[in-house]
């Protein structure tokens, strides 16, 4: 999975940004960024930044002079993210693996990771790296999706992918890190203390159901999985749209549920 994420390119970042992000990542980024701003950091590292939904909010809402470095495994995602930053934003973009960060110990006040930890092949290593680069008293703020039943659009998409190729692919990983006991154990094992988790529920308007369906199939590793299995993912979009419409209702609205975790470095 990590190699697939590294090779995100072609049309995938565009479908991610236009199809998925307005529904799934922009509304949740508002919540993540608001919590980050409350922590008043002076040096911020974002890992698995994607197309920069959180990054652009941090750049516009944190005080001038705040140092922000945004990283992702996929250079193509960072290129797209850079194009959406506010004018004059002083954000450094750097390709990096969150499991082996190229930064010195105790470099940051805050590490932020929205919907990335689930995809780390070695989650324990990712959390240890976050702890390593944080100064004493620093915070690690990260989010994961709750299960597919709590995110009905994901359940519908997963069912179609399973019917097509026999496995849920990204919809297994992305919605599979739901155990608070597992999360607390990972955080404790990485050296964090005072791990706090909360459930966040949002209702997100879906401005274009067709584009949302396309994003779910073409804007993430599902596109890679389907291509490897010889499936034309574009041909599945109309069927996914048909299945999504009764779930989203009228006006089309996606029910989102995520877990927000905040852990402190002693």
Image: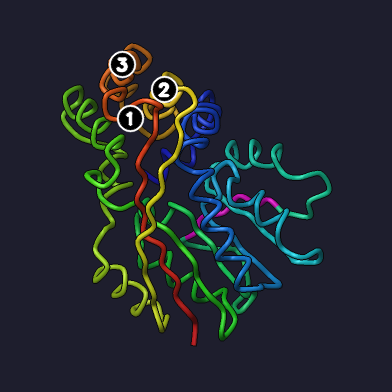
Q: Is residue 96 above or below residue 62?
A: above
Q: Residue at 41% across / 84% down in the picture? A: 193
Nearer to me, 237 or 207: 207
Identify residue for label 1: 248
Q: Residue at 78% across / 51% down in the picture? A: 89
Identify residue for label 3: 236
Badge 2: how crowded within 10 Å, few (<14), some, or many (20+)?
A: many
Residue 121 image position (x, y, % from top left): 35, 54
Badge 1: how crowded within 10 Å, few (<14), some, or many (20+)?
A: some
Nearest to N terminus: mark 3 or mark 1: 3
Q: Secondary structure at mark 1?
A: helix
Residue 28 image position (x, y, % from top left): 48, 50
Q: Is residue 70 above or below residue 74?
A: below
Q: Residue furthest right?
A: 88
Nearer to me, 248 or 159: 248
Dot in front, 3 or 1 = 1
Identify residue for label 2: 209
Q: Which residues are magenta?
A: 93-98
**CA separation in Å, label 2 and label 1:** 9 Å
Q: Decide: marks 2, 1 in contact (CB < 8 A)?
A: yes
């Amino acid at each position: 999975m990590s190699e697939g994420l590294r090779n995100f390119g072609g049309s995938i970042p565009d479908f991610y940004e236009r199809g998925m992000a307005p529904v799934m990542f922009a509304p949740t980024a508002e919540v993540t960024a608001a919590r980050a701003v409350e922590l008043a950091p002076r040096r911020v590292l974002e890992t698995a930044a994607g197309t920069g939904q959180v990054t652009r909010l941090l750049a516009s809402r944190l005080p001038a002079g705040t140092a922000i470095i945004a990283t992702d495994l996929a250079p193509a995602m960072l290129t797209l993210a850079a194009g959406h930053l506010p004018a004059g934003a002083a954000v450094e973009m750097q390709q990096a693996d969150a499991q082996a960060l190229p930064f010195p110990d105790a470099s940051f006040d805050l590490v932020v990771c929205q919907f990335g930890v689930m995809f780390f092949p070695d989650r324990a290593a990712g959390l240890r790296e976050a702890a390593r680069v944080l100064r004493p008293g620093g915070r690690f703020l990260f989010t994961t999706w709750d299960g597919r039943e709590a995110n009905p659009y994901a359940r519908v998409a997963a069912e179609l992918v399973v019917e097509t190729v026999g496995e849920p692919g990204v919809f297994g990983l992305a919605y599979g890190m739901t155990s608070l006991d597992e999360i607390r154990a990972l955080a404790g094992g990485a050296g964090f203390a005072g791990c706090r988790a909360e459930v966040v529920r949002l209702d997100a308007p879906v401005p274009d159901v067709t584009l949302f369906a396309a994003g779910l199939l073409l804007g993430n590793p599902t596109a890679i999985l389907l291509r490897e299995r010889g499936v034309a993912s574009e041909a599945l979009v109309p069927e996914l749209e048909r299945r999504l419409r009764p779930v989203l209702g009228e006006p089309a609205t996606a029910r989102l549920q995520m877990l927000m975790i905040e852990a402190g470095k002693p």
